């Protein structure tokens, strides 16, 4: 029974989805947040305001056109991508989608955190002769560990636990579907109460709990500096 | 080691917000120059333009003979100590001091030599592995100095480096900084709002107010010959006595007394008579000016005794012998030493005397 | 159990884990390399666009442009022909039980009010109570844990809680065990029973909302208790010295000072309430009058194959969110103005 359920495959798929879908929005968001916080460019404040606005836009609004574009223009269907034989490729559409959806929050949280870093540090580094990359990787990143950690928790939990986006973009075929889809299928097909369901639910919970417990000491500091300041 | 020249420097943020106006100073090689003024007077901006942290709107800044207007901060051969110290919180003391040298791609052995040398000078040898948060305020301040020293820059810039220290430590560090200046034989430019720091440390002082340079001179010159009403009021504690007065027949007439001026001023001038509290003493001389003061408050400091009260309709402060017995409400006769007399024009506020 | 795949596919995972960050790192280092070749004047003009470029591209591609596309699509039928308000007419047909009406009622009435209020109330009460408890962090982690599990797993757990056996049988579900054993009442079919009336079935909706609230309370608790910690102790002491009782202090000092945070948490919860999907999908599949907009949109698209209708539902959802969106922007501007 457990073999039929593809639990192991789904567990693996969840990792294949969640790790890049966390790394992408956090890193790309960090670059953008740094620019929003410490660089000057025309339209900066308006673009940032637009991102804040997008935080509240329901994702449901975007599914149909994106899916349409994937299938009609790019031919990125799960079957086509699997047919290429390149491992990992079938999940690329989902990674990019999660990155796009996660970015507004990622930028919002990190930009607020970066902006709160004392400007003296940046000026001192400038006099010391540090370039933009050095300042970013040797100053901003190490100082922002709490914010980054809490963002990683948020994004990882969100992606790992996501059902809707995965259902829409990769569907429920066993080779690519994550734990949540697998679990939801079990609930609807077998009904509650089976041992399998309990086992699957346990496996789907164990990873986010580990991530949460190992990073939680940063968590409060991170979200506070970002969202509830002032 | 280099001189620094501000040549008609202007800093303007918007058309009507000008924070530094036509600023001209020559700072000599190896000089300890203090920029002093109330907060918001433009002194920090003047320093930050020299550091390369703010663009110069008009004019030129020279380090040595080189115009640095378009030189990047890191290439100006300067080092800066920030008010907040700006220590990198995630790096050890050693790494904090090594950072600018690493940025200059210096050899590891040379970096090590310089950092150890600086830490020896500053007495930081035992703290090299610590992070800034495990240091006391005074130690942090010394790390900030160390980070500047290791670069052996031509010019040291210090932006209110003592204002985060407690009073006692500030006094000690003042002395240490002067010693450091002597040992390093480098130009120091020091920004502060504290006139005591300015008077005690500066070879020369430049006083600014509202973006305008008021006066440049040695502490003695500035104390004894303030160029205008602002400088006179800013330097010295307790502040100089200012009494509105009119000039008639070579003497100045205030509401409660009249004093013969040591130098003739055009009759009919209106303005402010100024004299420091120490010019008003309990020693009266024959034929000298005497003031009849009604004492409101007596302040005994041990070595000094200050009397606050009124003469005629004007408030003034006197410094008298600490053994003189006075109580609030008393009327006392005090002598005014006319050698320390100043007179400021009512319109221009410039010193006429 | 086929955990063997974990081993056979492991190389792929490793390549992905190392490859994705390497790619991103190469991008930023490479772009900086290009920027450095520009003149001193051009550099600060060009650099920011390299840093924000990928983010803006992804946000535009996945959020902004598709959202605009959906607006257009909601006026078209499935063949792409313009049909005016046709999709909306069918969504708004047959009040109060036809079209999208049930989903609208559940979202903007039941979910919005009860989910937000329950979560805020629990979060606030727990934050104030835990502030005075030993081992505060351990207790808080426990409450926060549901946040870490997926709504699907949450649905599974609460399905157990709400399980129903016929009267007289032993009740396996926790809720019904309580109802029969403590209240001596017949077991209740929590998720199916449209009590009190099919047009106002508050009971099964509250059952779903309760499960969702359990999952999110930890989030509200953590943020609210951090705000509580941010209130200076002097202030509370001053109030105590002034003779205020603990309840008065909460009402007149703590509560007003926490208001900004409560507003932030509240608006976030409102958005969550409007976007609710997973719990409904897993526990009732929108049956028994528990449909919500997000689920209806999904259903229209995949079960009914009606993309125009799905778009119209998505737009209805957007319209419900717009007031929150405007409020959010105002709040943000106000905070920015104070900087």
Image (cartoon, grey):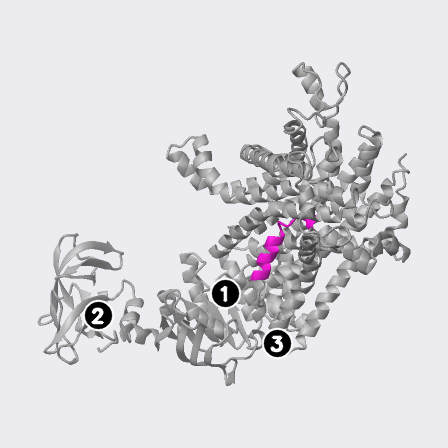
Q: Position of residue B184 (x, y in %)?
A: 50, 74
Q: Is residue B24 left or right of residue C67?
A: left
Write down the quadrant of residue B25 in the picture.
bottom left
Q: Is residue A48 magenta?
A: yes
Residue hosting label 2: B274
Q: Which residue is mark 3?
A: C42
For label 1, the SS is: loop
User: Marks 2 and 1, how far apart in space?
Assistant: 36 Å
Q: CA distance from mark 2 to mark 3?
A: 55 Å
Asked whether disc 2 touches disc 3, contact meaning CB atoms under 8 Å apart, the reply is no
Secondary structure of the residue carrying numbered label 3:
loop
Chain for mark 3? C
Magenta segment boundaries in residue numbering: A46-61
Question: Along the polypeptide, which appears first: circle 2 or circle 1?
Answer: 1
Q: Chain of mark 2?
A: B
* Predominant SS of the magenta segment: helix
Nearer-the-camera pick, C180 or C2: C180
> Tag 3: Cα neighbours inside 10 Å, few (<14), some, or many (≥20)?
few
Q: CA distance from mark 1 to mark 3?
A: 29 Å
Q: Mark 1 belongs to which subunit?
A: B
Task: Describe residue B262's horizontal placement relative to residue B15 as left or right.
Answer: left
**Does residue C230 sit above or below C55 in this rendering?**
above
Q: Which one is in front in this view, the residue at disc 1 or the one at disc 3?
A: 3
Q: Nearer the viewer, mark 2 or mark 3?
A: 3
The magenta stretch spans residue C203: no
In the rendered image, residue A210, in percent from the top left (x then y), is placed at 73, 42
For the residue labelled by badge 2, is the local secondary structure a helix, a strand or a loop?
strand
Mark 2: give few (<14), some (14-19) or many (20+) Cα within 10 Å: many
Q: Are marks 2 and 1 in contact (CB under 8 Å)?
A: no
Residue B58 is situated, as x and y percent measured from the top left of the image, at 45, 79
Q: Which residue is mark 1?
A: B82
């Amino acid at each position: 029974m457990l073999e039929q359920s593809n639990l192991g495959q789904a567990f693996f798929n969840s990792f294949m989805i969640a790790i890049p879908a966390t790394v992408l929005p956090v890193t790309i968001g960090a670059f953008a947040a740094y620019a929003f916080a410490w660089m000057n460019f025309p339209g900066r404040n308006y673009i940032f305001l637009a991102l804040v606005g997008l935080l509240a836009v329901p994702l449901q609004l975007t599914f149909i056109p994106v899916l349409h574009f994937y299938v009609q223009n790019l031919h990125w269907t799960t079957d086509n991508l699997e047919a290429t034989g390149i491992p990992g490729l079938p999940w690329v559409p989902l990674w990019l989608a999660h990155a796009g959806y996660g970015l507004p929050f990622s930028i919002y949280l990190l930009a607020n955190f970066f902006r709160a870093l004392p400007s003296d540090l940046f000026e001192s580094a400038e006099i010391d002769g540090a370039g933009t990359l050095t300042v970013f990787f040797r100053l901003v990143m190490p100082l922002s560990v709490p914010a980054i950690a809490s963002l990683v928790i948020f994004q990882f939990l969100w992606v790992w636990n996501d059902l809707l986006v995965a259902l829409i973009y990769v569907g429920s075929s066993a080779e690519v579907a994550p734990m949540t889809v697998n679990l939801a299928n079990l609930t609807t097909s077998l009904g509650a109460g089976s041992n399998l369901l309990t086992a699957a639910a346990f496996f789907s919970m164990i990873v986010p709990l580990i991530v949460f417990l190992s990073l939680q000491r940063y968590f409060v500091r991170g979200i506070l500096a970002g969202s509830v300041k002032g | 080691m280099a001189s620094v020249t501000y040549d008609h420097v202007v800093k303007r943020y918007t058309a009507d917000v000008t924070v530094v106006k036509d600023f001209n100073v020559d700072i000599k090689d190896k000089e300890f120059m203090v920029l002093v003024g109330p907060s918001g007077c433009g002194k920090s901006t003047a320093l930050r333009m020299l550091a390369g942290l703010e663009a110069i709107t008009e004019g030129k800044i020279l380090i040595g003979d080189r115009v640095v207007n378009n030189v990047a901060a890191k290439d100006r051969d300067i080092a800066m100590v920030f008010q907040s110290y700006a220590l990198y919180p995630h790096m050890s003391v050693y790494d904090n001091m090594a950072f600018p040298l690493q940025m200059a791609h210096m050899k590891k052995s040379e970096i090590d030599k310089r950092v150890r040398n600086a830490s020896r000078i500053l007495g930081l040898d035992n703290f090299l592995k610590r992070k800034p948060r495990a240091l006391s305020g005074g130690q942090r301040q010394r790390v900030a100095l160390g980070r500047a020293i290791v670069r052996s820059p031509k010019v040291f810039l210090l932006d209110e480096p003592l204002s985060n220290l407690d009073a006692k430590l500030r006094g000690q560090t003042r002395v240490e900084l002067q010693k450091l200046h002597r040992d390093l034989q480098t130009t120091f430019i020091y920004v502060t709002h504290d006139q005591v720091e300015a008077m005690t440390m500066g070879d020369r002082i430049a006083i600014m107010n509202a973006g305008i340079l008021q006066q440049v001179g040695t502490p003695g010159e500035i104390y004894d010959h303030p160029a205008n009403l602002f400088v006179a009021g800013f330097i010295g504690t307790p502040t100089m006595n200012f009494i509105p007065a009119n000039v008639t027949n070579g003497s100045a007439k205030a509401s409660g007394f009249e004093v013969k001026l040591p130098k003739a001023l055009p009759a009919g001038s209106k303005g402010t008579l100024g004299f420091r509290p120490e010019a008003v003493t309990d020693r009266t001389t024959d034929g000298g000016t005497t003031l009849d003061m009604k004492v409101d408050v007596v302040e005994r400091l041990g070595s000094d005794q200050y009397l606050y009260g009124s003469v005629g309709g004007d408030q003034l402060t006197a410094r008298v012998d600490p053994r003189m017995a006075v109580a609030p409400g008393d009327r006392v006769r005090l002598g005014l030493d006319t050698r320390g007399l100043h007179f400021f024009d009512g319109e221009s506020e410039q010193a006429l005397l | 159990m086929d955990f063997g795949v974990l081993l056979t596919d492991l190389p792929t995972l490793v390549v992905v884990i190392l490859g994705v960050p390497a790619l991103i790192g190469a991008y930023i280092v490479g772009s900086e390399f290009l920027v450095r070749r520009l003149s001193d004047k051009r550099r600060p003009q060009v650099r920011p666009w390299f840093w924000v470029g990928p983010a803006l591209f992804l946000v535009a591609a996945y959020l902004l442009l598709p959202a605009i596309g959906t607006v257009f699509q909601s006026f078209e039928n499935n063949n792409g022909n313009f049909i005016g308000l046709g999709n909306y007419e069918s969504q708004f047909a047959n009040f109060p039980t036809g079209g999208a009406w049930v989903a609208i009622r559940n979202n903007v009435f039941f979910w919005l009010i009860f989910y937000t209020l329950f979560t805020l109330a629990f979060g606030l009460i727990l934050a104030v109570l835990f502030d005075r408890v030993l081992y505060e962090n351990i207790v808080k982690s426990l409450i926060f844990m549901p946040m870490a599990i997926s709504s699907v797993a949450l649905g599974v757990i609460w399905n157990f809680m709400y399980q129903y056996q016929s009267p007289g049988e032993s009740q396996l579900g926790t809720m019904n065990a309580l109802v029969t054993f403590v209240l001596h009442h017949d077991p209740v079919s929590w998720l199916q029973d449209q009590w009190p009336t099919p047009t106002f079935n508050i009971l099964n909706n509250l059952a779903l909302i309760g499960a969702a609230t359990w999952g999110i309370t930890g989030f509200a608790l953590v943020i609210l208790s951090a705000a509580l910690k941010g209130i200076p102790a002097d202030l509370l002491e001053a109030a105590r010295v002034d003779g205020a009782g603990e309840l008065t202090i909460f009402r007149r000092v703590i509560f007003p000072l926490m208001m900004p945070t409560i507003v932030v948490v509240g608006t976030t919860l409102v958005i969550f309430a409007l976007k609710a999907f997973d719990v409904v999908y897993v526990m009732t599949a929108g049956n028994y009058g528990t449909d919500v907009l997000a689920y209806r949109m999904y259903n229209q698209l995949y079960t009914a194959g009606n993309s125009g209708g799905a778009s119209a539902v998505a737009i209805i959802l957007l319209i419900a969110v717009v007031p929150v969106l405007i409020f959010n922007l105002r709040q943000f501007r106000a905070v920015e103005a104070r900087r």
